[in-house]
Image (cartoon, rainbow, N blue to C red):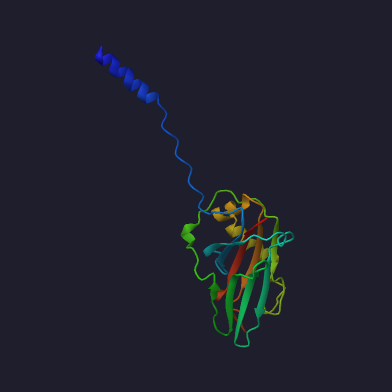
Amino acid sequence: MRRILLMILLALAGCTESPSPSPEPERWDIQDDAANFAVLQVDYVTRELEGGALRYFALCDTCDAHGIPLNFSFKYPGDFGWNRFLYEATGDTVFYGTTVWHGRGDREVPSELVSPDSFSQLAVAAPDPISIEYYPICEEFIFDCRENWERSEADSVWASVRTLDIVEAFAKRSYRVGLYLYPRTIGGFDPRSADWIVFLYAGN
């Protein structure tokens, strides 16, 4: 009798479903009550992600109705110049990098990037953003304002990061994308020192 009872208990134990694993917490926290900016740095030559940063600023009412609320400005390098993107609503610096004539500038804001290993690649690309903006399409500051700086080149950079999990996190809301070619040196453009900067934005 004891043997029969033991067999029944074992059979019941085998039928019991194991608890489902808890879903992983969101790796990237996109906040509803903030202006969310991600800055991704991509190598100009290899198109490989070099890292990124996620930052939050005060949410504005209507500043993002027609595009990413960023103001771009630059100082042409006689010897030393800079490139700056300010958040329109607060004046906070989202990106700042220097450019040196026949030298090498560097990115100063964000001061540090999360390593590429912190980002996961997904099997499916994120849904389309509301808009893609190109900074600048053609400015004196770009090494020769060449016509072969085509949107297709920038679009290939966007395609290279579109399967990242951080893009998927932004895409769960209405989001916008900005693409910027950041030259660290001019007076002879050095592609080995240049980067593409990809901005992700989600606000109202």
Residue 189 in picture, x, y percent from top left? 61, 79
Q: Is residue 10 left or right of residue 168?
A: left
Residue situated in front as seen by the camera: 106 or 151: 106
Residue situated in front as seen by the camera: 151 or 179: 179
79 is higher (above) or lower (below) than 136? below
79 is higher (above) or lower (below) than 40? below
Which residue is the extreme one toward the right? 66
Residue 90 seen: yes
Q: Is residue 159 left or right of residue 138?
A: left
Residue situated in front as seen by the camera: 204 or 143: 204
Which residue is the extreme one toward the top? 1
Q: Quadrant of residue 181?
A: bottom right
51 is higher (above) or lower (below) than 165? below
Residue 77 in picture, x, y percent from top left? 63, 84
Q: Quadrant of residue 74?
A: bottom right
Q: Is residue 20 left or right of residue 140?
A: left
Residue 190 seen: no
144 is higher (above) or lower (below) than 173? below
